[in-house]
Amino acid sequence: MLQAGKPVDETIKSLSKYMEKGDIIVDGGNTNAKDSVRRADQLEGQGILFCGMGISGGEEGARDGPSLMPGGPKEAYDELEPILTSCAAQTASGPCVGYVGPIGSGNFVKTVHNGIEYADMQLIAEIYDTMKTVIGLDNNEMSRVFEKWNSGRLESYLIEITASILAKEDGITNKGHVVDYILDKTGSKGTGKWTVQEAAEVSVAAPAISGALDARYISARKEERVKASKILSGPPTSNLSPSTRKSLLKDLSNALYAAKICSYAQGLAVIKSASNEQKWDINLAGCVQLWKGGCIIRAALLNQIQTAFTSNPNLVNLMIDPVVAMELNSCLASWRNVVITCANNGIPCPALSGSLNYFDSYRTASLPANLTQAQRDYFGGHTYERIDAAGPFHCAWTDAHKDIGNVNERTKGQK
């Protein structure tokens, strides 16, 4: 388990001198999938089996069992399996380890796991900001809300630790809570960026993950934000009645639940598309099993997600599973109200609104992309398809376009 990049290459070079054909090297760091493929190719000539294994769980996982996501030669996994099964996190549905697929697949699944983690953390931060800024709850009150939520359908590791964080008093000043003394600049080690890049590579929308990544980038520009806060205006905070506060709290719970479903849907769609493209044959229900214990994104919700992909292994998107769709539909009014409340109060909510936009785009049979295609054809002659005829078309939008003509007519009779 090393820092990604050169340290891994140097260690493999050093180790491989003493290894024989059939020996196994496992990289358990946050490595880019493409690097693992390259390293496996380099070691293949020596007969050394190389595995890239994503690991999640932090200090707690190291003590009680992590989530393990191994990818590489199947014969290597078969030898490693007894060791990995015994040290992985254990759940009622089995250990949180399993063969993901060929080399690169394990690293890829871990990368997307971290992307979902980015989104989940940002969603919780946006809910926290709304509770604090609009409803006016103090840290102890918010801690109790998250603690209550953790006993219901929002039960998850991140909700659990959020309740604990908000209740933690500051031991340095002995005044107030630690969270209020922490500088609002979020770090990033690269896996969130990799997830967004990989989503773009396979042409899959992941707005909750990209929104969370953008939020981290803009948080890092603290000095700029402080200066901007003195120049740029925001709306006044709403003055809510007690009944409205109670209603908004319920809406926040529903919005968070729906947006979490959508963030998992986006991440799993990225894995599915990459698996198809790379011919990894990743089992999404099995992939979800790896995340049910030990890892940062473990949550009660994963039971339902696993059931969805077990019932229909060919499910193209989590959101159209009948049970999941019903739950999303039931949360819609709350979800929209929360995003509107954030906008009206000047609270940035890139993950909440990004997931809602993802939902609305996916459920819409007719998007305004027809206008975009017309614009592309107008300025670049990129052509478009029609709803009433097959084949590419180009329109003579102006006199300058007339000599180009209709693409179908121009190419008629030609292969």
Image (tube, helix red, strand yellow):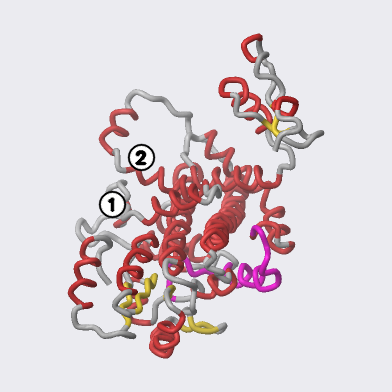
Q: Residue at x 61, y 50 (%)?
A: 251
Q: Position of residue 290 (x, y in %)?
A: 49, 74
Region in magenta: 294-317
The residue carrying mark 2 is 218
C-alpha distance separating marks 2 and 1: 16 Å
Q: Position of residue 32 (x, y in %)?
A: 36, 60
Q: Are marks 2 and 1 in contact (CB under 8 Å)?
A: no
Residue 121 occupies quadrant: bottom left
Q: In the figure, 309 relative to 340: above or below?
A: below
Q: Which dot, 2 or 1, sits closer to the camera?
A: 2
Question: Is residue 310 shown in magenta?
Answer: yes
Q: Which type of secondary structure does the marked residue at label 1 adopt?
A: loop
The residue carrying mark 1 is 182
Viewer-closest of 365 and 349? 365
- Is the C terminus in the top left, top right, bottom left or bottom right quadrant? top right
In the orientation shown, which residue stands out farthest toward the front? 414
Q: Which type of secondary structure does the marked residue at label 2 adopt?
A: helix
Q: Residue at x 76, y 33 (%)?
A: 413
Viewer-closest of 245 and 161? 161
Q: Identity of the amino acid at label 1?
A: Ile
Q: In the figure, 334 relative to 321: above or below?
A: above
Q: Residues within 10 Å of mark 2 (few under 14, many from 20)?
A: few
Q: Identity of the amino acid at label 2?
A: Ile
Q: Residue at x 46, y 67 (%)?
A: 105
- Report the side of 35 relative to 334 (left or right): left
Question: Is residue 254 shown in magenta?
Answer: no
Q: Which mark is residue 96?
A: none
- Count of picture labels: 2
Earlier sequence position, callout 2 versus callout 1: 1
Say if residue 380 shows up in the picture: yes
In the orientation shown, which residue stands out farthest toward the right? 388
